[in-house]
Amino acid sequence: MQTGDGRQRASVQIGAVVDIVQKEDQRTGHLTRGIVQAILTNSTFHPHGIKVRLVDGRVGRVAQVVSLKTGNEE
């Protein structure tokens, strides 16, 4: 279920659950799921995805926004 385009900054929010591609995974395209702690890209659009830092400290570009909010979703 894709709720947002990871290339548009407006689709990425702090606290959102996202799948990112870390620098070392760019060749394989391996996705890492986590919660956004900080948005690191200032521009409104980036062709490879908006760069974010997850709450666990990992950094990567958003491939897709899984959920805009965390917690109890119905």
Image: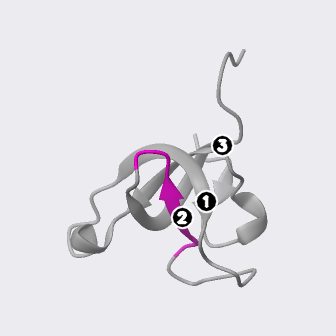
Q: Nearer the viewer, residue 4 or 16?
A: 16
Q: Which mark is residue 12?
A: none
Quadrant of the rendered structure where residue 22 is? bottom left
Q: CA distance from mark 3 to mark 1?
A: 9 Å
Q: CA distance from mark 3 to mark 2?
A: 11 Å
Residue tagged 3: 15
Residue 11's place in the image compared with 72, above or below, is below
Q: Which of the marked residues, 1 or 2, is nearer the chain's N terminus?
A: 1
Residue tagged 2: 52
Q: Is residue 51 magenta?
A: yes
Residue tagged 1: 38
How many numbered marks, from 0 up?
3
Q: Nearer the viewer, residue 31 or 34?
A: 34
Q: Which of the marked residues, 3 or 1, is nearer the chain's N terminus?
A: 3
Q: Quadrant of the C terminus?
A: top right
Q: Amino acid at mark 3?
A: Gly
> What are the residue bounds of the magenta stretch?
49-56
Q: Amino acid at mark 2?
A: Val
